[in-house]
Structure formats: structure tokens, C-alpha cells
Amino acid sequence: MRIIKFTTWTLAWLTAFICATWAAGALYFDFPKASAFVAILFVIALLAIVIFVRGKLLKLAIVFGAFAAVVSWWLTLKPSNDREWQPDVAQTASADINGDEVTIHNVRNCDYRTQTDFTPHWETRTVRLSQITGMDVAINYWGSPWIAHPIVSFQFSDGLPLCFSIETRKTIGQQYSTLEGFYRQYTLIYVVADERDCIRLRTNYRREDVYLYHTLASPAQARQRFREYINTVNVLHENARWYNAVTSNCTTSIRAQRAVKLRAPWDWRILFNGKADEMLYQDHAIATGGLPFSELKQRSLIDARARAADDDPNFSHLIREGLPK
């Protein structure tokens, strides 16, 4: 009985500590004025309560009440599309759907000299749903093997592929911070781009590792996924949405844009997305050529081919040479 009681209190205080820490962070990062002062004052007040208030239950009740108050305020913060955005996310894509024909505005196709020195180009492209032949997925790494960035690319029989990259929309001077990603510092943006922009930026200029896989999605399945992306693109164009490093990031958003009944079962690798390609392999969702996963991944690294192709108009074909189908 003592062990159960001790464990219960320990879990309660651990939960209270986590909630209080998150709330202090919310005040520090998101409170509009004197945020550091307000966050410090919040922490001092909670410490005083823990030290001077009698009764464990009362202490916990006050801590959780303070957490609830901060959450209630935090949920009132509204994102906006009207800010001074960095040039690479200055525009949000939108699409006009007319039967089989989809016209996409603000397709990004920048002319890069370095990863930070580039000329932005925003194009309008018209595609036909009936000409979608399939979809590929690129997994992009820049450090930890546990964390990556997925890019979904749709193939067309009569035109160039189109990439969808779900990213943070940063204002001028703003840098990405994983810690700040847990709060309301960034909005979510679906970048629709040419592969010579979205993929070449990462392989040729950022010098990151990009692995490209053919999915086994049928044309009909690929069309359905394309519609899901386009629907979300239009929603975000009209109504900004917050990015969150856990609940609304570059991978969880892909799952969330699907109808609930169509969503794949939750898998921890959706969150630790550096292992997403391993998950797709085990789910028989990507072409393997009969290879074990380790060999497939090795062959799927496209950096050398992308650097050799560079700005070749045939870039999309060249980076796929030798990939299992």
C-alpha cells in the first residue's frame, strides 16, 4: 500500500512539474509584453506556494489551476497570415479546382546561388488529376538519425513533378528553435514547389542527406492524397494555423489532413520521423526491389545524383536513376 501511495504522489508531482514548466515556457515565449518578467514571477509564485502552503492536495490543486489558467489564455492566441515573412515563405500557395484541372498559384521555384542567397520565383502551374501517375516520398536528414523532414512529390505523365513540404513559416530575422516549436512562435505553411527548388536546396546547398523512395500508391490513391494536400493548402491560404513540434509538424500534419477513418494507425515513428522510411518499408508502402531495408536506404540516397544534375531541366529524372520501382 505504501508503494502505491508513494508512486501515486510521485506521478502527481512529476505531472505538476511538467505542467508548470510548460506553462512557464508559454509565458516566456508567447506572452506579449515583459514575457521574461512574467515567466519568472510565475515560477516564483509557484515555488512560494509549494514551500508555504500546507497540504499536498491543496498545493497540487493550485499548481494545476495555474496551469489551466495559462492554457486557457494560450489557446486564445490567434495566428495570422499578415506578417513580415522571410522571402522563401513570403507567399502561401492556393489552388483553383475545375473538374479534372487544378491550377496552383505560388508554386515556389527559386533560383539559388547559396542556401541564403537566392532569387524568389513564384509560379502558377496547371495540372490534371487524371495525369497523376504516382507519388514519391523524400526523407531529409540534417543531423540526428531520429529526426527528419518528409517531402511528398506527385508524378504527372504530362509534366514535371510537384513537391509538398510542410514547414514553419518564419518572420524576417526569426530562426527555428525546437523548444520554441512547442509554443506559438511559428505558423504552418505547405510549400508547393518544383523539385529543383525543394529537393535541390537540401542536397546541393544545405548539403543535407536526402533519401528518395517510390511509393506503391496507385494513381487513384495518389490522386486522393493530392486532393488532401490541395484542400489543406487552400484552408491555410485563407486561415493561418499554428505549427507545433509535436501535434502539428511536418509529419503529423500529413496524417491529420486525412479523414479520421482513413488515417493509418498511430506509430511512434510518425513522431520520430527519422525512422519513417523504415515504417513505410515494414508497411509495404514503398518499392523495395526485393532489397533488405539497409541496402534499399543506401541506394535511395540521391545527393550525388542531385549535385551532378544541378539545374538540369531533367533533374527529376536524373535523381531517380537506379531507384527500385
Image (cartoon, rainbow, N blue to C red):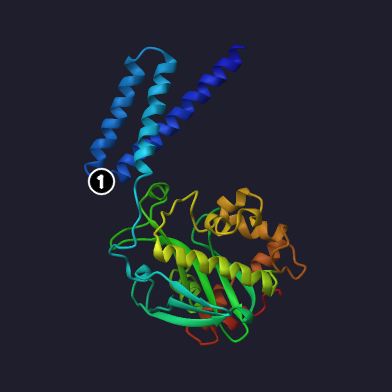
Q: Give the tally of numbered discs.
A: 1
Callout 1 amino acid: Pro
The residue indicated by pointer 1 is: 32
Viewer-side residue, 227 vs 110: 227
Where's the C terminus, which quadrant?
bottom right
As drawn, the residue found furthest toward the right would be: 290
Q: Quadrant of residue 216?
A: bottom right
Viewer-side residue, 78 vs 63: 78
* Left or right of 268 on screen, residue 324: right
Q: Position of residue 132 (x, y in %)?
A: 62, 78
Q: Secondary structure at mark 1?
A: loop
Q: Position of residue 270 (x, y in %)?
A: 59, 53
Q: Position of residue 204 (x, y in %)?
A: 47, 74
* Left or right of 68 on screen, residue 297: right
Viewer-side residue, 285 vs 202: 285
Residue occupying image coordinates x 51% and y 87%: 313
Q: Position of residue 152 (x, y in %)?
A: 56, 68
Q: Quadrant of residue 58?
A: top left
Answer yes or no: is residue 310 visible: no
Vertically, is 37 above or below 176? above
Residue occupying image coordinates x 31% and y 65%: 85
Where's the N terminus, which quadrant?
top right
Residue occupying image coordinates x 26% and y 41%: 35
Q: For mark 1, does the 10 Å Cα neighbourhood hold few (<14), some (14 to 19), or many (20 or more) residues?
A: few
